[in-house]
């Protein structure tokens, strides 16, 4: 396959970026999207040019770091996948592909296609945990009976990998699907109910402090989420917030 790439290049966080054109050849349809970028970078390095910076780690759809905006879609033209799981057979020989970083004020560009998503970490640090004081051996989690429906819903929420596709896709750059998933993960379990009121308030306050926009319920975040996180989690987060006001 021969492809025309239009890639966002930006030297650093303070530089002005622009789209730069590249051509790649001999791309196999079985390559992943990141492998295609590896081929491009190998060519650039051989030509003494600066390689394109992009985030990646596990390349197995687990870590969420390979977040790219491809032809106007977070993670590209497929569903329920991360960028590293996108294969070149989704494109045709001769296609032009636009590759950009996730766009959001709260996700500032560091270099090229790499953005700073540490705002998600700070939201987690604000309340996305359970504090349990123990003496002696830690209590076995299986000793606490949990309704299977609640357990399944908690596991579904916990599959969120914090990639930021919800923010990049939302016209308001809202992080409410991410925060809703993290709140739900604990709100559904008995271990999380002790700190439930403080947790939801702290996490939402931090989300607002980071500059994320508000949710307007268009549902684009759910559509583009590689893990299929449901909008139900946003509704649950709102209920938890309302409950915290009356406790």
Image: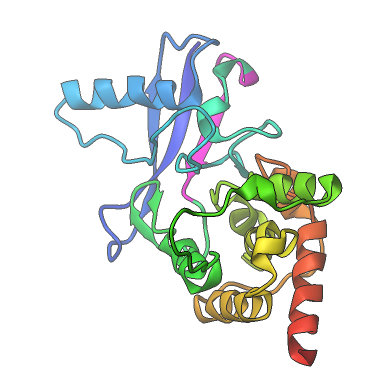
Q: Please report the bounds of the magenta region as a residue range.
A: 90-101
Q: Nearer the viewer, residue 149 or 57?
A: 149
35 versus 99 height, above or below: above
> Residue 50's quadrant in the figure?
top left
Q: Which of 239 and 131 is in front in this view?
A: 131
Query: Which part of the image, by quadrant, shows the C terminus?
Result: bottom right
Q: In the image, 78: left or right of 23?
A: right
Residue 35 locus on image (x, y percent)? 41, 21
Residue 108 locus on image (x, y percent)? 41, 63
At a point 45% along the width and 64% down the height, the residue shown is 135
Of all residues, the one furthest to the bottom in this rendering is 246
Query: Visible in this render: residue 223?
Result: yes
Of all residues, the one furthest to the left in this rendering is 48
The structure's colour scheme is rainbow
> Residue 168's quadrant in the figure?
bottom right
86 versus 130 height, above or below: above
As for residue 97 lying within the magenta part, the answer is yes
At a point 78% along the width and 51% down the height, the residue shown is 146
Residue 12 locus on image (x, y percent)? 26, 57
Residue 29 locus on image (x, y percent)? 55, 11
As for residue 196 lying within the magenta part, the answer is no
Q: Nearer the viewer, residue 2 or 178?
A: 178
Q: In the image, 110: left or right of 73?
A: left
At a point 76% along the width and 75% down the height, the residue shown is 240
88 versus 206 height, above or below: above
37 versus 171 height, above or below: above
Of all residues, the one furthest to the front in this rendering is 136
Q: In the image, 165: left or right of 42?
A: right
Q: Nearer the viewer, residue 123 or 50?
A: 123
Query: Visible in this render: residue 171?
Result: no
């Amino acid at each position: 396959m021969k492809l025309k790439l239009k890639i966002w290049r930006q030297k650093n966080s303070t530089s002005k970026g622009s789209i730069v054109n590249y051509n790649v050849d001999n791309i196999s349809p079985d390559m992943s999207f990141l492998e295609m970028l590896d081929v491009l970078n190998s060519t650039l390095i051989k030509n003494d040019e600066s390689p394109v910076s992009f985030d990646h780690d596990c390349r197995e759809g687990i870590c969420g770091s390979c977040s790219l905006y491809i032809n106007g879609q977070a993670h590209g033209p497929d569903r329920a996948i991360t960028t590293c799981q996108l294969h070149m057979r989704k494109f045709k020989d001769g296609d032009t592909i636009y590759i950009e970083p996730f766009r959001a004020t709260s996700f500032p560009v560091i270099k090229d296609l790499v953005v700073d998503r540490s705002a998600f970490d700070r939201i987690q640090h604000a309340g996305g945990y359970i504090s349990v004081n123990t003496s002696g051996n830690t209590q076995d989690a299986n000793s606490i009976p949990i309704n299977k429906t609640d357990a399944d819903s908690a596991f579904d929420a916990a599959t969120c990998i914090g990639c930021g596709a919800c923010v990049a896709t939302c016209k308001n750059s809202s992080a409410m699907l991410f925060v809703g998933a993290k709140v739900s993960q604990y709100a559904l379990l008995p271990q999380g109910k002790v700190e439930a009121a403080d947790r939801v308030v702290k996490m939402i306050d931090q989300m607002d402090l980071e500059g994320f926009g508000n949710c307007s319920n268009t549902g684009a975040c759910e559509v583009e989420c590689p893990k299929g996180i449901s909008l139900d989690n946003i509704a649950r987060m709102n209920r938890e917030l309302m409950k915290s006001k009356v406790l």
